[in-house]
Image (spheres, grey):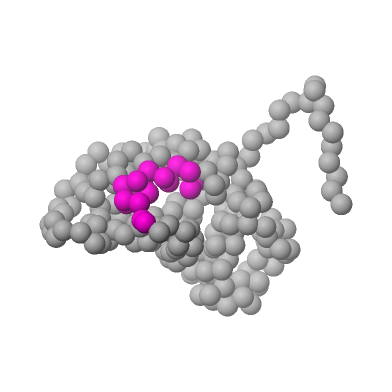
Amino acid sequence: MSNTDPPHDSSPPPLVQPMARGLAFTGALKIANEMFGPHAVELITRDAPAVRAITGSRISGLRWYPYTAFAELLALFRNELGGRDSGFCSKIGLAAGKRDLATIFTAYTVKPSPERLIRACTGVWASYYKNAGRMKAVSCTPDRTVVRIFGFSSMSQDHCRLMEGWMVSAMDVIGADVLPGAGETTCASQGGAFHEFRCQWTPATSSASGVVTSSDADQEHQSA
Ligand SMILES: [Zn+2]
């Protein structure tokens, strides 16, 4: 039974709050369950009402849930499972990205190029989050891959860490070896104009182009 209010013409437009797809919750929860066991996860979510409202019953992967609950879940992971390590959620992201994308890509018989798949990030982001800005690949070359999220300054910083890990494993799944130093270089949640994630990579299959310098790492860093 659901209580649905009829729409009123005079009513103000609904406030747009960021939402996360059930898949975002189930992906992160599965990884935490694997790493720490279902009992530990159950224990930490018990006293978190917003999270509990979602994890307490069956989560539908395609349904939209409040983003604030997703942010709360990641904060719980960091504080209760990750020993308050601010980078902890990148480990969840690493494992979750691998799982999420491996499932998607088994559908392909011919793998598209990494560049093309990086450009597809806009649609991937929109399928997981709504009213949550827009993700765009501004550069896709091996020596300079830059992905930005515009218009989402309320993104949780644990989620920024999750995205760092997710990006690295996503690159791995699409056939690219990510070089050390990948991560977020500008953060809108810390006053930046957008969230920006950078990495350098080599195609896992093709020519030994060899040396990729780290000179890219120090270009146009923007600080808050
Ligand atoms: Zn950020």
Above or below: residue 60 compared with residue 18? below
The image shows residue 7 at horizontal and vertical percentages of 81, 30
The image shows residue 118 at horizontal and vertical percentages of 36, 47
User: Magenta stretch containing residue 26, yes or no?
Assistant: no
User: Magenta stretch containing residue 111, yes or no?
Assistant: yes
Residue drawn at the location 72% of the way across and 58% of the way down? 53
- Give the quadrant of residue 45: bottom right
Residue drawn at the location 58% of the way across and 77% of the way down? 37
Image quarter in which the C terminus is found: top left
Residue 86 appears in the figure = no
- Give the quadrant of residue 91: bottom left
The image shows residue 58 at horizontal and vertical percentages of 71, 63
The image shows residue 35 at horizontal and vertical percentages of 51, 75
Above or below: residue 34 compared with residue 79? below
Comparing 128 with 40, the one in front is 128
Please state if 6 lies on the left or on the right of 167 as rendered.
Answer: right
Please state if 56 lies on the left or on the right of 73 as rendered.
Answer: right
Outermost residue on the top side: it is 10
Please state if 210 lies on the left or on the right of 116 as rendered.
Answer: left
What count of labels does the image hold?
Answer: 0
Write the start and end of the magenta stretch as one range. 110-125
Comparing 160 with 176, the one in front is 176
Comparing 154 with 16, the one in front is 16
Residue drawn at the location 45% of the way across and 62% of the way down? 106
Residue drawn at the location 54% of the way across and 63% of the way down? 28
Residue 133 appears in the figure = yes
Magenta stretch, main secondary structure class: helix
Please state if 20 lies on the left or on the right of 198 as rendered.
Answer: right
